[in-house]
Structure formats: structure tokens, C-alpha cells
Image (cartoon, grey):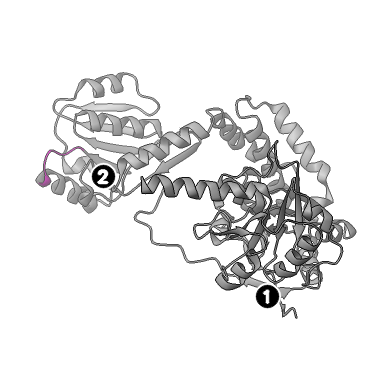
Amino acid sequence: MTVSRVPLEQKPPRMESLARLPLFFALDGKRALVAGGNAPAAWKAELLSAAGAQVDVYAETPGDELLTLAALPPRGPVVLHRRAWQERDLEGAAIAIGACDDEHDAARFSSAARAMGVPVNVIDKPDFCDFAFGSIVNRSPLVIGISTDGAAPVFAQAMRAKLEAMIPQGFARWADAARRWRDPLKSSGLSFAARRRFWQIFTGHAVNNPNQDPQQSDFNSLLAATQAEGEIVERGCVTLVGAGPGDPELLTLRAVRAMQSADVILFDDLVSPQVLDFARREAKKMLVGKAGHGPACKQSDINALMVALAKNGKRVVRLKGGDPMIFGRASEEIDACREADIAVEVVPGITAAQGAAARLGISLTHRESARRLQYVTGHGADGNLPDNIDWKSLADPTVTTIVYMPKKTLAALVTNAIAAGLAPATPSLAISQATRPDQSVIADAIANLPARLDAEKPSGPVLVMIGSVAAGYQLQRSAVTIRNQA
């Protein structure tokens, strides 16, 4: 018997402890002070100038780097004062950086800045700092700062290198275009919802054309695309998103963009908490749980809630484990949206069979032994084994069969399949929590698998793989055992 459950809003978790609060100083035209003449002081002065600050550097003997910087600053002027800093120099400064030789000088500089109410950083002396500099990825006006609170600078540099490789240089042009187009968009007459939709279309276009130089024609075409959606934007929309089998790194970029633009996210029990971390923090998150053989929201209630939210102008993401189009009741939800004249789209995800096979290093098809791949549901709408399964297809020795949600019905399924000709010794695997850290695997002949599954009672969602390709896992385990014994 299925126990009914109502949609339940999930409050976002409290922000976890931060080593430092990431902030971005607006320094354009403001005065910044740098005390010291060495190379680190020159680098900090260059950063301040690049941010538009008017930089006063106090150094009795400025190094070559500072002399070169003062002659050709990146943005704001850099003025050298060939003397030691004095307390009155801090008056009117928005920020102060000190390159101090010892703890005494650092304490004196820090105390003087704080007495003047000036945020202070003493290079390489965190005990005297109000703020820290992190590694920077510069696609200005898109700027990313990375900090490890001094614990692992090399790790921060590695993250910066990875982000530099991921983010095209051309994004700087698109970010600048966004700044230029913000005022024209506000005066376009579009509603707030439509303007937000414009920026979503803009982002998708920028991601797909990162090296294109944005032109006025791009703004015009994006504006026209937004206006063409008309009332659909005001009514909201629904996006069915595949969350994958559990590992958040298997999310697609399109899935992440959908979650980060959502007003409301309706998610299932099978969606891992780590996947929800990618969602827009301000989005309302509601559990509309549909876990196999457990308490479940009625599908009709989910459909009604989804449509009602979209009619109120919300951008709704229906987040499903695996792929929405594989045993995810996607067709029922798509039909509900279309009947209500609500715009609906689908973002596919990696289904559990693909994720499990990849994690185990098993190809679901093999040109010599597996000619066909089939997905079979282990239970119907009533929770029992469906009575319209093609048993002969399960008995085919050249097919790989993946059975979804078979915990309660596997024994009956195996009995019927063997009666139809499936060899009792056919290799099989029961995989629970596919792709997650606690993934587990039971490997045995198909005739023995139901008893093993019943005895070991693995937690979480389970899928069963039947066919000759499943023997590959046993061979891998044997090879590992031999290597370990050697």
C-alpha cells in the first residue's frame, strides 16, 4: 500500500562557517596607500591601480618594479613618494597595504590604519590583516577571487588555473556588454520577469558564443527573442531536469543553469543533497518525494502544484533523479503543462544505468556478445511486477537488461525470466546508490541474486544488470585480487 504524502518545503541549510567573507572593494577614483618598495608591494599597487584606485606609494628606495609601474600604470595613477610613510598619510585612504620587514613595523602600520578606520593588509602577515588577497581570475567586469585563508596557496593557484582554462577570455566582452545593456533594457518596457528572462537568454548565447564580440545587433536580437515569448514569460514555465544518479559532478551545464535560474525547485527523494547545492540559494525547494515503495506524493498533486506555480509566474524546475524521460513519469508532467498552456522543456540527465556502468568500467554493449540494450521497470503503477513484460526478450543471451526499481519484485521477475529461457547462471549485478560514495555491488548468477539482495538489504535505490557484460565486473575483481596477492 502506498502511503500518501504532501509536498514539503525544504528550508535551505544555514550557511556553513566561512574562514573569510568574500567582498569586492569598489576603488574607482578612491585613494589607496601602499607602504614599501619591494616587488610584493609593487604587485599590490598594480592590483589597486587595475581596480581604478589612485595609488600613493611611500618607499624610501622604490624597486625597479615600482618605477616601471609608476611610469605605466594599468588604470589608476601610481604616485611614488620617496620617503617612509607617516600616520597622516592614511587620512582619506580607502584601503592600506603594507610591505613590512618585521612584526614591530607590521603592528605599527596596522594599528595606525585601524585607528584611522582604514581597512588594512600587511603582506604575508595575516595576524595584522583586516582582509586578504586571493588568487584572481580576471574577465573583468567578471572577476573571481579564490581564497584558502592562507592554508593552501598552491591549491588556490591550482583552482585558478582550472578556472582560467574553463572560462574563455571572451567572457570579459560579454560581461562588459551586460554592463552597457543594463540601462537600455530597463527602459525597454519589459516587465521584471521578462528582463530576467532576457538575461537568461543572454547567458545562454554568451556561453555558446564566448569568443564573439557582442554588437548592438546581438542586443536587438536577444530583446526580440524575449519579447517573442510574450505572455509565456509572465506565466512562468516548467523545466524537467535530470539530476543524474547522485554524483553532482555528473550534472550537465544546462542542468546547473536551469537550477540557478529557478524560483521553485520540486525535487524527489532520489536527488542527492549535493546536487541541490548547485541550485540558486534563493529558490524555494520543495520535496515532492516519490521513493519506491515508500511514502509518496500523488502524481496528480505534483502536477497541480507545478502548474499552479508556473501560472503565478514562477520558473519551476522539476528535478528528478537520473533522466526524466526514463521511468520518471515525465510524459504525465509534460502533458499537464501542455494542457494548462504552460511552457515546458526537458533537460536530460545521466540515467542510473549509464552512471553505474561507467563507475564499474562495464560497457553495456559489446560487439561480440551484447547486441541490444533494454531498460525494464521492476514495478508498475500499483507497485507490483508489471504483467506485460516481454519475457522472451529478457531470456535473450545477446541482450543486456537493466531493471529499475526491482527491490520488491526481483524474485518474481527472475522466476518468470528463467521460465521463459533465461539461463540461471547468467551473470548479474545489483547496484545500489549508483555513483555515490556509498555505492555497493552484489555480483552473482541471476538465479541467486534475489536471495542475496533480500539477505544483504542494500540501502537506497537499486538497479539490476543482467547479461554477459556483467561478468566483466567479476573479472575485474578477480584481477585485483590476483594483483593484491602477488
* Magenta residues, dominant SS class: loop
Which of the pair 433/281 is nearer the observer? 433
Label 2 vs label 1, nearer the camera: 1
Which of the pair 279/485 is nearer the observer? 485
Residue 55 locus on image (x, y percent) = 31, 32
Q: Cα distance, mark 2 to mark 1?
A: 56 Å
Q: Is residue 221 something that shows in the picture?
A: yes
Q: Give the magenta part as a residue range.
A: 99-103
Residue 475 locus on image (x, y percent) = 54, 47
- Disc count in the image? 2
Pick whichever of labels 2 and 1 is earlier in the sequence: 2
Which of the pair 481/51 is nearer the observer? 481
| Mark 1: amino acid | Gly
**Badge 2 is on which residue?**
121
Q: Secondary structure at mark 2?
A: strand
Most extreme residue toward the right is 339
The answer to if 354 sits in the magenta stretch is no
Q: Which residue is painted at 47% across and 38% down in the image?
A: 143
Which of the pair 292/305 is nearer the observer? 292
